[in-house]
Image (cartoon, rainbow, N blue to C red):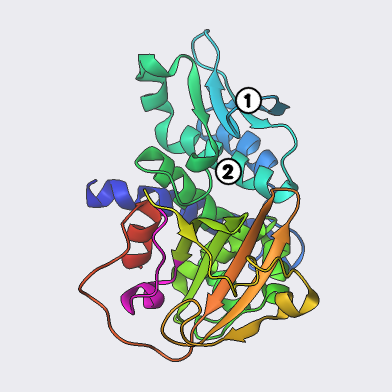
Amino acid sequence: MSEPTRLRPLREASRITQMLDLVLGVDRFDRAPVDIINLALEYSRQIAPESPIHEVVERNLPGCVGALVYGKASPRQWAIMYHAGQSNGRRSFTVGHEFAHYLLHRQLIEQDKGLKGGIYCDENSVDRRGGAGIEQEADEFTAALLMPLHDFRRQQPAKERVDFDKLSRLAKRYGVSLTAAILRWLEYTETRAMMVVSNEGFAHWAKPSGPALKSGRFIRTKSTVYELPSQALAARRDYSDSALIGITQQAGVWFDEPVHEMCFRSDRYDQEITVLQFEADGPRFQEEEEEGDAFDHLIRNG
């Protein structure tokens, strides 16, 4: 991917962010998150009055979380659909993802005969970890638009550790899921930290911060089964208040150094979210790195 193309999602998000800051004020998140549905409708009318997004609707989309579709008539009329039953935070990110496809990729989507009237995105395309190509670009745009770093950093400085109370307040401030807020924090934090998403004692996926990755703190979940340590809070099914606050796990439980572990259980999505935070900077590690994906490359590129 060329440099201008790689930066285009962030530039587009920055342009809209500056517009919103100018119109609503730089303190706008003190009052409300980005109204992504109305933004998609109004902004598309401004930039493409002949071919705007004419509706954002809830639909039953088996196997998908969202879609950007267009009608047969020309000029095209577009619509965003999001799968029924999503939480408000997940819905915001889904709509933002499809809005990004409209801004960045609608010509590609229209010209691709294999897409048959639109693009349908499954969960792996909209969760900031499994996407590539235009799905990665859509995720980058959405995170930057819903959670601008200039505001996020003010709320959570890069050198400070977090707890679930802070992370939940950030998720509420930006109207996103807890997972999205944690992943955004992991992009810029200067601390060594990691998120692990698991169920039934096994990790589905894990993401380290840049400093954690550089010190060799990562978990392989691609093409392998990673069983949680027996003393991990999720493995013990400990979802108590103490687990939310966190405990110190000794060296040898997760890695060969102590780690502060916090765990939260989401019954709605039948999964646990574990956040690991390490002390100090840790060793430099360059011989082997986590198997890369789109989000990993984003972390390494700052």
Task: Say which residue appears at 27% left-offset and 49% top-offset.
Answer: 4
Task: Say which residue appears at 24% left-offset and 46% top-offset.
Answer: 1
Magenta-span inclusion, residue 287: no
- Quickly name the residue at label 1: 62
Which mark is first along the chain, 2 or 1? 1
Any part of residue 81 in sight: yes
Towards the viewer: 57 or 222: 222
Quadrant in which residue 154 is drawn: bottom right
Task: Say which residue appears at 43% left-offset and 79% top-offset.
Answer: 255
Any part of residue 45 in sight: no
Q: Is residue 275 above or below residue 77?
A: below
Spot the residue most to the bottom: 280
SS under mark 1: loop
Q: Which residues are magenta?
A: 208-222
Q: CA distance from mark 1 to mark 2?
A: 20 Å
Circle 2 packing at 10 Å, graded few (<14), some (14-19), many (20+), is many
Foreground label between 1 and 2: 1
Amino acid found under the numbered disc labelled 2: Gly
Q: Is residue 74 above or below residue 177?
A: above
- Quickly name the residue at label 2: 96
Q: Residue 170 at what x, y percent from top left?
A: 67, 68
Towards the viewer: 148 or 49: 148
SS majority, magenta: loop
Q: Residue 63 at what x, y percent from top left?
A: 58, 28
Q: Residue 98 at what x, y percent from top left?
A: 54, 36
SS under mark 2: helix
Amino acid found under the numbered disc labelled 1: Pro
Spot the residue most to the top: 73
